[in-house]
Image: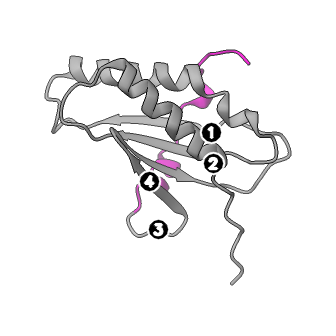
Amino acid sequence: MKQTFKKDERLSSRQTIDRLFKRGSTEVHTFYLFPFRVLYLYEAPTAVPVLPQVLFSVSKRNFKKAVDRNLIRRRCREAYRLHKAVFLANPERTPPASVAFLYLAKEKTAYDVIDKAMIKILQKLATIPHPSPTRE
C-alpha cells in the first residue's frame, strides 16, 4: 500500500463534519487517548474495504499562532499517513467511514509521542467491531 495522503482521504464534506460533531448523537462514537480525542462514524458496509476520511483539528484557544497549529497538524497527518495500513490488515473488519482527530494537549508534543499515540488509536479503530444497524 502506498503511504500517501490524498484529497479523497481528507474529510471535507460539511454535512459529514456536522454529523460528527453533533452533540448527543447516537451514531457518533468517541474515545480518548492522550493527546487525542477521536470521533468516528460508521456508514453502511461496502464490499471493497475503503480507507476512512479523516480530519485533524488543533484548537486555536490552546495555540494562538497558526505556525504552531500547522506544525502539530503536520505531525499528526504524517503519523497517520505512515500507519494507516493498519485498517487494511484485517479484511473482515470494516473501518469507520469518517474519523476526526482532535488534539487536546495544551503544549506542543514531540513527534514520537504523537506517532505512538496514532499507532495505538489506529489499532483500536481497526479492532472495534462495526455496530449492527438498529431496527426501529
Q: Nearer the viewer, mark 4 or mark 1?
A: 4
Tag 4: amino acid: Phe
Which disc is residue 31 wearing?
4
Residue drawn at point x = 27 percent, y = 25 percent = 109
Which disc is residue 52 wearing?
1
Judge the density around disc 4: few (<14), some (14-19), many (≥20) Cα neighbours within 10 Å: few
Q: Residue 130's spot in the image, x, y percent?
A: 69, 58
Q: Which residue is mark 3?
A: 25
Q: Which segment is the magenta one?
A: 1-22
Q: Which residue is mark 2?
A: 96
Q: Residue 47's spot in the image, x, y percent?
A: 86, 46
Of label 3 and label 4, which has the lower sequence position?
3
On the picture, is 88 further left or further right than 23? right
CA distance separating discs 3 and 4:
14 Å
Of label 4 and label 1, which has the lower sequence position?
4
Tag 2: amino acid: Pro
Instruction: Give the SS element for disc 2.
Output: loop
